[in-house]
Amino acid sequence: MKIAIVGGGVSGLSIAYNLAVRSAGEIHLFEKNWIMYGSSTRSGARFRVHFWTEENSRFAIESIKRLEKLAGKMEWNPIIYRGGYLWLLFNEHQIERFKETNKMWSKLGVQGIFLEPEDIRERYPYINVDDVLGGFYGPQDGSLHHDYVCFGYYSLAKKLGVIFHEFTPVNEIIVSDNKVKQLKTMSGLVDVDVVVLAAGAWTNELLEKIGIHLPTEPLRKEVCLTEPYHYFIDPLIIDMGSGAYVGQTLKGEILGSIDYPTPPGLIKLETKLEFVIKWARAITKRIPILKNARVMRTWAGYYMMSADNSHIMGRGPEWPEGLYVAYGYSGHGFMMAPLVGELLAENILTGKIPELMKPFLPTRFRENKLIQEKLVIG
């Protein structure tokens, strides 16, 4: 069997590795630029297990377990660190929502801790809590090194025989008798039996050429990074009032973003001064000691947003035989990709749909079985 994966980010790399370790056949990965060109290397490099929906929470819990197990096999240290997430809450509605959802998280074994303003002040004296009503701390959440995770998958997959085609854009999927037959690339036609589209924000371009439309759209997201300082911010802090988040890398840089309106679509990946100003104002109000922090660089990437803010994996029964997708992560790609690769490989090779995968099938949109995930950060 000849399998082609389109997209060289963490999702495509995880799928390639998981197929190769199962001796799936001849596996090729196509990337139109270089490995990790897209949103994977533009990630905020964080993970969490706390989502409003049980489906996403379960998936994230199992996905991080997979990554932790794989870390020992990688030549690159993914530097997985559970420093926690701290949500700052500003009204009773937010507090009640977290309390209610914490019952579900408790059932899954990832319950969090509620903090009063004085508790936050004692634990994190650098946070201004004058207008904060409470906080929720999730100790199971944390950070990783996004580049090292991807390089780890790449190295393992290459050793297992995956063939990488960088700077080789796929322009079209050739379908005959409702089966995928070939990929049209700049280097010519490539015969295939299976195609997995994991190209993030660029996936729809290939799907729509063969008449498949899924309710997704790319949304540009921007990130700021300062020069390094003495390490003092342990959790990722999410301000539920301003929509900003801020954390610190293990090297000491202050990193963060803010919910900032941008038009959807494949717009230019650039950062705006308005974004930097809005984020800086929000975080210096929340952490006044950062008022003199110097921004060193900014960057932008895409969240590929699905209609319900949950990822899409697998295939529709009416699709051309051999066609699969893994995208629409809505900002959660890095934390979900390790399990996506495992489950999708099983699905491709056996035809069986694993239980954890079933809620995320593309058929959910027409069946009105949406996974309405509202806890999206950034």
Image (cartoon, helix red, strand yellow):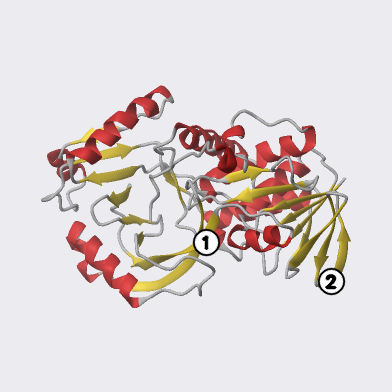
Q: Look at the image and tell me in which quarter the C terminus lies.
A: bottom left
Residue 94: % across, % down: 24, 40
Q: Is residue 335 left or right of residue 8?
A: left
Quadrant of the rendered image containing residue 122: top left
Q: Which amino acid, by three-letter code, is at mark 1? A: Pro
Side (left or right) of 139 relative to 17: left
Q: Residue at x 37, y 73 (%)?
A: 296
State the residue at coordinates (21%, 47%). 124
Q: At which x and y percent is residue 315?
A: 69, 43
> Disc 2 residue type?
Ser
Circle 2 Cα neighbour tier, 10 Å, few/some/many (<14 / 14–19 / ≥20):
few
Q: What is the crowding at mark 1: few (fewer than 14 residues within 10 Å), some, or many (at least 20)?
A: many
Q: Which residue is mark 2?
A: 187
Residue shown at 34%/59% (left/top)? 259
Residue 278 appears in which quarter of the rendering? bottom left
**Which residue is nearer to you in this view: 294 or 47?**
47
Q: Does dot 2 land on a helix, a strand or a loop?
A: loop
Q: Residue furthest top?
A: 107
Task: Report which residue position mark 1 lands on.
Answer: 218
User: Between marks 1 and 2, how big is the CA–CA gap?
Assistant: 28 Å
Asked whether residue 259 appears in the rendered view, the answer is: yes
Q: Quadrant of the N terminus?
A: top right
- The vertical placement of 111 against 240, above or below, is above
Q: Residue 34 — which label?
A: none
